[in-house]
Image (spheres, grey):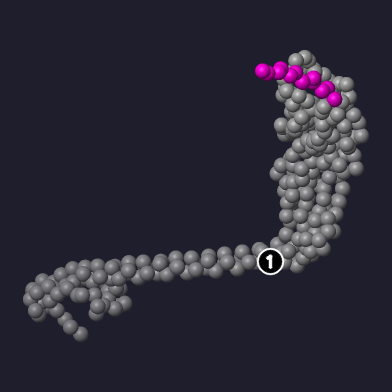
């Protein structure tokens, strides 16, 4: 014997397994399952989205017979905080979750240019890569002093640069630039951070630059001097070799005929002095010409 039992669906149960599938800057994909398996009719869900920053509510209606429901919540703000509630249209028990959208990305190419008594922060416009960012929103700049272990808010600007003055000698600073926070600092962009340790030696910035120039000169000048000395020695060696070869050739060319020995005498060049270099070349003698020796 057997008995067939059909359970009566309870529409007062809450949706099951509510969770977030994917979260972007301006949207969020959520997913849940029906209160019971295999609904035999369309079910109407109410999706309430509460903006925890702006303190505003929106309600969306979803009608489906599927056991698994996937829904995309649109028109959200980057860096926002939301409370999502899903329940059946008859105001049954609810399932809820919190969602934080992805904040605006950090500005690119943050750089520091050092001036005489201040520094300039430069960065690329965030609007070049973020379609949801308007330049009128602007940027805010923070500074962290590692020596004092404090963080200071320097201000905000709608430009792509910012001037920072009154830096203390011997302190290391970290600067961060981000899209300006909205609604009491609750909706901010990702910060771009850059370390500035130009004054880390405890010297004035101009003194640091002069010290670096002196160090470079102390290295470059000796190297150039050694190169000049080496080149000079090389030229002297080449000149001496050339002079020796020239003297040898002159000694060979100044060979003469000795009538007393009856043969040609060639000097080796060792016994030739400066006077020999200036003496006229002897071309030769004849046997019938007497040689007079003083």
| Quadrant of the image containing the C terminus | bottom left
Q: Position of residue 246 (x, y in %)?
A: 29, 67
**Is any part of residue 141 visible from this angle?**
yes
- The answer to whether residue 293 is left or right of residue 192 is left
Label 1 neighbourhood size at 10 Å, few (<14), some (14-19), many (20+)?
few
As rendered, which of 237 and 257 lies closer to the eye? 237
At which x and y percent is residue 83?
A: 84, 34
Residue at 75 percent of width and 18 percent of height: 6
Residue at horizontal 74 percent and vertical 49 percent from the top: 193
In this picture, which residue range is highlighted in magenta?
A: 1-12
Corner quadrant of residue 276: bottom left
Residue 5 inside the magenta-drawn segment: yes
Q: Is residue 124 magenta?
A: no
Estimate the x, y position of residue 169 in percent, counting from the top left.
79, 64
- Position of 42 relative to 274 (above/below): above
Locate residue 133, reporting x and y percent.
80, 33
Left or right of 124? Residue 249 is: left
The quarter of the picture where residue 52 lies is top right
Task: Tell me if residue 195 comes above or below residue 212 in the rendering.
Answer: above
Report the front residue among 151 and 9.
9
Q: Circle 1 sits on which residue?
A: 211
Report the predominant secondary structure element of the magenta stretch: loop
């Amino acid at each position: 014997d057997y008995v067939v039992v059909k359970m009566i669906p309870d529409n007062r149960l809450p949706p099951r397994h509510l969770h977030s599938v994917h979260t972007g800057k301006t949207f969020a994909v959520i997913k849940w399952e029906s209160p019971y398996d295999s609904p035999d009719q369309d079910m109407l869900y109410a999706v309430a989205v509460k903006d925890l920053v702006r303190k505003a509510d929106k309600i969306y209606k979803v009608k489906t017979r599927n056991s698994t429901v996937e829904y995309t919540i649109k028109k959200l703000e980057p860096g926002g905080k939301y409370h999502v509630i899903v329940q059946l249209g008859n105001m049954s028990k609810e399932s809820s979750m919190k969602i934080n959208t992805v904040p605006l990305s950090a500005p690119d190419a943050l750089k520091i240019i050092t001036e005489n008594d201040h520094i300039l922060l430069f960065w690329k416009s965030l609007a070049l890569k973020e379609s949801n960012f308007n330049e009128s929103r602007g940027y805010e700049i923070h500074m962290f002093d590692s020596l004092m272990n404090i963080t200071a808010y320097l201000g905000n600007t709608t430009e792509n640069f910012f001037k920072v003055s009154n830096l203390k000698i011997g302190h290391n600073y970290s600067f961060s630039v981000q899209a300006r926070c909205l609604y009491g600092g609750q909706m901010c962009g990702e910060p771009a951070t850059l370390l500035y340790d130009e004054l880390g030696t405890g010297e004035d910035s101009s003194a640091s630059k002069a010290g670096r120039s002196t160090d470079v000169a102390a290295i470059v000048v000796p190297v150039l001097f050694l190169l000049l000395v080496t080149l000079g020695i090389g030229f002297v060696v080449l000149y001496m070799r050339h002079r020796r070869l020239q003297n040898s050739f002159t000694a060979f060319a100044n060979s003469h005929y000795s009538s007393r020995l009856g043969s040609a005498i060639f000097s080796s060049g060792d016994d030739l002095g400066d006077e020999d270099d200036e003496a006229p070349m002897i071309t030769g003698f004849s046997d019938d010409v007497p040689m007079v020796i003083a």
